[in-house]
Image: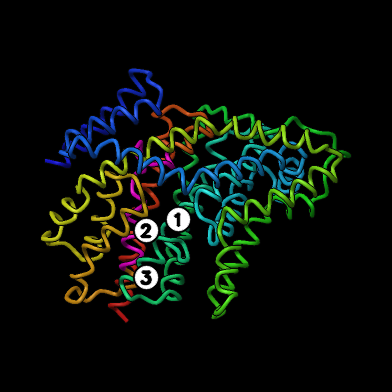
Amino acid sequence: MHLLLVLIGILLLVLLISWGKVNAFLAFLVVSIVTGIMLGIPLDKIAGSVYKGIGDTLGQLAIVIVLGAMLGKIVAESGAAQRIATTMMNIFGVKYIQWALMVTGFIIGIPLFYNVGFVLMVPLIFSVVYKYKLPAVYIGLPMLAALSVTHGFLPPHPSPAALVTQFHANMGKTLLYGMTIAVPAIILAGPVFSRTLKHIVSSPLEGLVAAEKPEAQLPGIGNSLLSSLLPVLLLMLTTVLSLVLTVQGKWGPVLQFFGDPSIILLLAIAFATYTLGVRGGMSIPRIMHIYEDAVKDVAVILLIVAGAGALKEVFSASGVSKEIAAALQGWPIHPLVLGWLMAAIIRVCLGSATVAGLTAAGIILPLMTRLHVDPNLMVLAVGAGSLMFSHVNDSGFWLFKEYFNLSIKDTIRSWSLMETIVSLVGLGGVLFLNYLMVLL
């Protein structure tokens, strides 16, 4: 019964936004309250769930999105994004630019949280799109597919890393198996699938793309790359240090502090302010005005993401995820498929990949002793399920929709189906690896 009520809530949200033309943030608030009432949450607890969902979501994303937008804006306004786009196009050509962006997304996606990678790389995608008059969704989706796969499949991202611990898997093996499955998933969901999306008309946020500058006014390629990718380099460095070194005593908290994405982005902003701003001849007031414009560009996105967080928390507070997972336990299917299916259904209902993965793991963990399945593959099966069909209750859906300025229909046609392909190919890869292990 709860599952039906969740579906009714999601349908109401879609109708309010697409048919009723209601502001997305207002629609989220209304649907969150109505769904909370339908799911039986006490009336005096519903407002608290909404506040908690908004607070938890913005607490994690607000700093990242705002600082990422500032960095993207200064990279664009200084001409660094134009320099990088021109250099990439000269090296790879228009024919292979998708593959260049996809590989870039995969490399930076390993150490970067998804939302950090998204807000840092989208300005680069838009620079290529506007400079060479290319379809935005067609060009950008492969890079975002790579970011999504690394987020769901590969440690040290939060969900797969937590799953490795819960299932007592080996992080090295999980990473190796995950890499093996990730490559075909990214290719099929990225360059191959995006060929069907060339007709989608998209006008991405022009605020993240500056007017084209003369060649002589552009910063050097070294400065452009270092200033743009400094967060990636710092996150990679801190991640590697935390994995290969046993940091004890006073250095442990220091590494943890400097490895936080918000601190890294703040350092990157300070660095870019000097290298791209002051050294490029900009005054401090001019640079601060650029940053203020960047905040205006993403203010609506922040509200919509907050609304998605409110709805997710209402679903979680109702206990619907545990009810769904418990109903699936007795199904006579392969354990790896069962783990994937639990995570997939919870993901579709709740919207959060991390919540879906960890909830499914908590349910299936007691069954692991009698399932006789490789725990490393179970991590990947649950991780793949947690990416299934992102839609209106997922903050990633709204980031993609608002940044690329798409309708809900086109967002589902592109983003949601891309995530579905990633999930299904991931499951297929897990089952294939399991088959090989049985044979060997």
Distance between mark 3 and mark 2 Cα atoms: 17 Å
Quadrant including the C terminus: bottom left
Question: From this viewpoint, which residue is outermost toward the front?
Answer: 44
Per the image, label 3 sits on a secondary structure element best described as helix
Q: Residue at x 24, y 55 (%)?
A: 341
Q: Which residue is mark 3?
A: 164
User: Hey, what amino acid is under mark 3?
Assistant: Val
Quick one: label 2, few (<14), some, or many (20+) residues within 10 Å?
many
Q: Which residue is mark 1?
A: 149
Residue stretch rendered in magenta on the structure: 378-397
Q: Nearer the viewer, mark 3 or mark 1?
A: 3
Distance between mark 2 and mark 1 Cα atoms: 9 Å
Question: If you read the primary sequence from the N terminus, does the residue marked by circle 2 or circle 1 appear first?
Answer: 1
Locate residue 295, reporting x and y percent: 60, 34
Per the image, label 2 sits on a secondary structure element best described as helix
Q: Is residue 392 magenta?
A: yes
Q: Is residue 428 left or right of residue 306?
A: left
Q: Which residue is mark 2?
A: 426
Q: Nearer the viewer, residue 162 or 269?
A: 269
Q: Which mark is residue 138?
A: none
